[in-house]
Structures are given as C-alpha cells and as structure tokens.
C-alpha cells in the first residue's frame, strides 16, 4: 500500500511535474468539452487541420518574442482565425470543404516549419511545438491556461442550447432565427483558443487526439449530451494524469504518453461499452461489426 | 447586419408581430435560380389560416426550394414572401419538419431534448427552460401521443414515432405554419393514419399545414387544397380542378404515363422516391 502511495507521490516532489499535471489536467478537460461538439458535428478533420495551421503564427511570435507565452498565444490564435476564415472562403467557391482544409492546413504547416527552420536550434524548438513540452510549463502559463480555459467552458455553458440546436439541426437554428453564422464563428473561435492552449501539453501534431478521442469514447458510453460532455472531460482528465505518470516511470515523451492513454480508453470503450461495444455486438449478433447503418 | 439584428433579437426576444387581417402566408411572384437555371418561376399564392395544403409534383419540381424560401432560409432572386403581412425574417412562428433522412438519429439526445429545442427561440440567450417551457413541451408530446416515450433516445424510435416527435417540436415552437417535407414517405399505413389524426388536431388549433407528398390519392382525399408544382404552379385548388389529365400531364410530362382505357384515363406511376430532393 505504501508502495502505491509512494508511486503516486514521488513525481509530485518535482515542481515541474506538479505544474505539468495541472496544465495537462486543465487542457484535458477543456479540449474534451469543446471536442464533444467537434465529434458531433463531424469536424474532426477540421480540428486536426486547425491544430497544424497555428504553427506559422506560433513561429512568428517565437521569432519575435522568444518563449514568451502570451506572444505565442496571440500568434497561434491569429493563425487559427486566419485559417478558419480561409477554409470558409475557399470552400464557398467550387472547392469542396475537405479539399479546402487539405490545401490550407498543409500550406500553413509548411510555412510554420519554414519559419522555424531559420533558427539555428531548429530541431529542438520544432519538436516542442510539434509534440509538446508539458514539463516546461511555467506558473504564468498555468494562469493563461486557467483563465482562457475557464472562459471556453463558461461560453460553452452560456450558449449550450444554441450550440445544441446548431449541431443537431442547422435548419432549426435558421427557422428559430438564431444568429447561426455568429454561433458558428464563436464555436470556431473556441476551438482555436483550445488548440492554442493545448500547444504546450501535446503539441500541434497530436492535438486532435485530445479534441476527438475522449469525446468519441464518451459517445460510445452514453446517449445524452450533458453526460457525454462530463464523461469526455473525465476521460480527458484521467488521460492527462495517467499519461504523465506513464511518461515519468517508463521515461517516454509526455505528449505521446497522454495520447496513448486516451487512445487506450477509446479502445476499452469501443470493445466493452455496455450498450454499443463490439463485445456486446458479438455476443448478441455473432458479428464484430454492425452491418446496417442505423 | 442581419446577423447582428438576430443577436439583438435573441437578447430582447422581439419577434415580429402579427397582423391578423392578412393571410398567414402570401407569396408574390417568387423566382429562384440556381446557377442561372430556374428552380422556381413566378410563384404566387396565399394560404388561409388553419388550411391543410398538399404540394405534389415530380422530383426536382422545387418543393424543397419552395419550403426553404417560405421559411426564410433561402432568399429568392425575385418576389416577396409575407407572413401575416410581414417578411419572414423575424418570424419564429414557422416550423420546418424535416424529412427523416435529413436527421442524424445517432445524435445523443432523447425525445424531450428534441422537443425542448423548439423552445430555444422563445427562451432567448442565457436563459434556461422554466416550468412553463416544460409544460409546453409536455403538452406537445401529449398531443402527438409520445409523452410516455419522452426519455427514449431518438434513434430507438420507429419511423412514425420519429415523425411525431418532430411535429411535437414544431408545436413546442408554437408554430402557426408548419412545413412538412414528405412526412408520410416510408411509413406504414397505421403510422400514416396516426399522423393524419395529429393533423386533424392541429386543424382545430388553427395551425396551417403545408405538406409535400408523392401520394396523389392521399393528397386528393386528405387535404383541403392541392398545389401541382413543376417550377411553376401548374394548378392550385380542389382535387377535381387540379387532377385533370391535362394538368397532370403538364406537371409530370415524361415521368408519368397517361393511358386511355375504356373506363377513362389512367395515370401510371410517379417515379419516386425514397431519397428526397435537395
């Protein structure tokens, strides 16, 4: 018993581990909550693209201001907003939306890498942006994540029923005369903020796992939106904690460790979900996968 | 600018007032073009309060486009729509009951969640449902005979039950004009009958109903008036005025066959229709 307690407490003796845990925990919760809408609206591709596309903004801020977090935040957010608008503008013409996403995301990502490659310590910095550096989180970073993460959650709660209508039935949002375009942009802004906040925990390359995987796991476990959000947040939080401990004891990079744990949770839900799991389907119908669409 | 107004309307809950001396719905000279091709051409008609009207016409006749124009989702290239004498932009008394194939039935909501969505327009921003809203939702479900299934996930319902939930949502919206896109398609006879029972109840509440359908017999028997549509209004009125060989042939030319038999003219087959038209 004392072994187990020591196992849990030992890492907390290091201040960087405590800060990392708090940061990962907050990011895990916020991205899982906003990720619920990403999963329900089929925006996973968009979320992944937006995560990569903040890189040039982060790079410019980095070249100008070094590792100043508020610069990185503003830079990343600016690039995120520009990309969202760009994808919207391109897909209004004769280009399909997933094509527009493909074009914008790789273009912005390449620009980001190109900008960072002008610095001599190129590979180390790039690795941090790509895969996160949660153990390098400072106290001011924690404040930034706490304040803006809290704002994201509060906004989701404040617009809960409007976002629900918009996600379930866009036509209803029009006949109820809701400001659908405003709500759409608001949601994109919340996604962009969340992505920039997650930059240090998992990095741009693995970010969409934090957005999509906890919510996808939760969707296999419940058929109610509020419960799905709460479950996703719980899975996001647990992944952050277990992932960091895993990284501490097995000595692997922290970002991938967190993502591996959340993927493991997804597999558990996929196989063992009491209502929708593959195991139940197998026991009931003798087939591992559902044949019919509904 | 319109968007800003809508945000404002959400705060103040100021929706359009009704001038009851005007018809509930009046279209004047509506034309819609998609990429230059006419989808609707000089559509003009009026509906009276409490009326039940069926729109029939071949695939691509513009039925869904017409619904989109009436509900204010699509701006026509020409003409105007009036709801009780005013533009539809700020009315929330129009409800659109979607085709079942348009709905994501796996979405994590139950029956009462869906019905409560109809109240969102009346509630306004930052407000949660109050006792009155729950009552309205409950009564709406009662009217369509679905109150005993209010906690059921929507994907677990039968087709007829799903259709009734969306009618309940329109009721919770306090809609006075309901646009129903093929509500009867794919339902068995018994479920269709229960939908008509609900439509009868709605008539007693003076709800005006516009239904698109592919079943000409049902349209002739169960509706007050019929609109025969193929980009233009080919005919509008009682069944015996509209379902004449000339008009039907004009509307369905190519998609329907007119056969002369000793007993009279016979029409064969509206070539339709499980996917709907978009």
Image: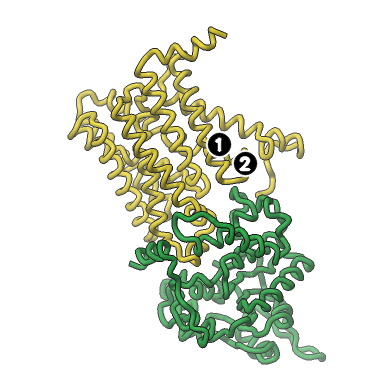
Residue with the most extreme front position: B131
Residue B160: give x, y in percent of width and height. Answer: 72, 62
Q: Nearer the viewer, residue B228 or B223?
A: B223
Tell me residue A267's x, y (percent). 59, 31
**Residue B64 can be seen, yes or no:** yes
User: Label 1 marks which chain's residue?
Assistant: A
Pick whichever of labels 1 and 2 is earlier in the sequence: 2
Q: Residue at x 60, y 87 (%)?
A: B236
Q: Which chain is green?
A: B
In this rendered view, identify the residue nearer to me: A241 or B21: B21
In the rendered view, does A176 fall on the left or right side of B150?
A: left
Count of all numbered marks drawn on residues in the image: 2
Chain bearing tag 2 is A
Please tell me in which quadrant of the rendered image residue B101 appears: bottom right
Whether residues under marks 1 and 2 lie with C-beta atoms below 8 angstroms apart, the answer is yes
In the displayed structure, does residue A146 sit left or right of residue B115? Answer: left
Element type where label 1 sits in the image: helix
Residue under label 2: A222
User: Considering depth in this image, is A269 or A93 the residue closer to the camera?
Assistant: A269
Quadrant for the N terminus of chain A, please. Answer: top right
Q: From the image, tell me which residue sits under label 1.
A: A231
The secondary structure type at the circle numbered 2 is loop
Q: CA distance from mark 1 to mark 2?
A: 9 Å
Q: Residue at x 41, y 54 (%)?
A: A184
- Residue density around tag 2, few if under 14, some if 14–19, many if 20 or more, within 10 Å: some
Using a 10 Å C-alpha cutoff, classify the residue at mark 1 as few (fewer than 14 neighbours), some (14 to 19) or many (20 or more).
many
Report whether A4 appears left or right of A123: right
Asked if residue B100 shows in the view, the reply is: no
- Give the side of residue B269 with respect to residue A264, left or right: right
Q: Position of residue A51 (x, y in %)?
A: 37, 39
Q: Which chain is yellow?
A: A
């Amino acid at each position: 018993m004392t072994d187990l307690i020591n196992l849990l407490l030992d890492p907390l003796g290091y201040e960087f581990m405590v800060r990392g845990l708090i940061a990962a925990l907050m990011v895990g919760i916020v991205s899982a909550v906003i990720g619920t809408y990403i999963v329900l609206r089929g925006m996973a591709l968009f979320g992944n693209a937006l995560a990569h596309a903040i890189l040039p903004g982060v790079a410019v801020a980095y070249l100008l201001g070094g590792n100043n977090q508020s610069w990185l935040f503003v830079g990343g957010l600016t690039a995120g907003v520009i990309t969202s608008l760009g994808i919207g503008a391109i897909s209004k013409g004769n280009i399909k939306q997933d094509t527009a996403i493909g074009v914008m995301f790789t273009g912005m990502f390449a620009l980001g890498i190109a900008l960072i490659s002008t610095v001599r310590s190129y590979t180390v910095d790039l690795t941090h942006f790509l895969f996160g550096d949660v153990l390098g989180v400072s106290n001011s970073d924690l404040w930034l994540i706490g304040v803006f993460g809290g704002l994201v959650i509060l906004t989701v709660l404040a617009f809960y029923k409007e976002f629900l209508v918009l996600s379930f039935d866009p036509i209803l949002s029009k006949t109820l005369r809701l400001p659908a375009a405003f709500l759409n942009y608001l949601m994109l802004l919340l996604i962009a903020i969340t992505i920039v906040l997650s930059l240090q925990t998992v990095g741009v390359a693995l970010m969409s796992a934090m957005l999509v995987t906890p919510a996808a796991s939760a969707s296999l476990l419940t058929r109610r939106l509020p419960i799905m959000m709460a479950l996703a947040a719980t899975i996001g939080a647990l992944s952050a904690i277990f992932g960091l401990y895993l990284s501490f004891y097995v000595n692997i990079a922290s970002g991938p460790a967190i993502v591996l744990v959340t993927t493991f949770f997804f597999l558990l839900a996929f196989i063992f979900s009491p209502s929708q799991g593959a195991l139940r389907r197998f026991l009931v119908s003798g087939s591992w996968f559902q044949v019919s669409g509904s | 600018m319109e968007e800003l107004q809508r945000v404002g309307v959400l705060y103040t809950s100021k929706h359009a007032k009704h001038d009851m001396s005007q018809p509930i719905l009046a279209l004047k000279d509506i034309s819609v073009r998609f990429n230059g091709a006419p989808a609707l051409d000089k559509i003009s008609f009026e509906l009276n309060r409490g009326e039940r009207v069926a729109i029939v016409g071949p695939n691509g006749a513009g039925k869904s486009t017409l619904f989109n124009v009436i509900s204010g989702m699509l701006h026509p290239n020409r003409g105007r729509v009036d709801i009780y004498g005013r533009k539809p932009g700020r009315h929330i008394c129009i409800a659109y009951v979607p085709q079942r194939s348009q709905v994501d039935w796996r979405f994590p909501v139950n029956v009462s969640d869906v019905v409560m969505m109809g109240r969102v327009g009346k509630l306004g921003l930052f407000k949660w449902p109050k006792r009155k809203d729950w009552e309205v939702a409950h009564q709406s479900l009662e009217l369509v005979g679905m109150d005993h299934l209010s906690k059921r996930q929507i994907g677990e319902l039968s087709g007829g039950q799903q259709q009734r939930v969306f009618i309940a949502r329109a009721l919770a919206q306090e809609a006075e004009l309901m646009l129903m896109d093929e509500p009867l398609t794919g339902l068995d006879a018994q479920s269709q009958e229960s939908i008509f029972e609900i439509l009868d109840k709605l008539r007693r509440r003076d709800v005006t109903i516009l239904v698109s359908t592919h079943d000409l017999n049902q349209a002739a028997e169960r509706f007050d008036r019929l609109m025969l549509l193929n980009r233009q209004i080919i005919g509008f009125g009682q069944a015996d005025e509209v379902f004449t060989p000339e008009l039907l042939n004009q509307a369905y030319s190519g998609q329907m066959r007119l056969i002369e038999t000793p007993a009279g003219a016979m029409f064969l087959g509206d070539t339709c229709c499980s996917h709907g038209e978009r």
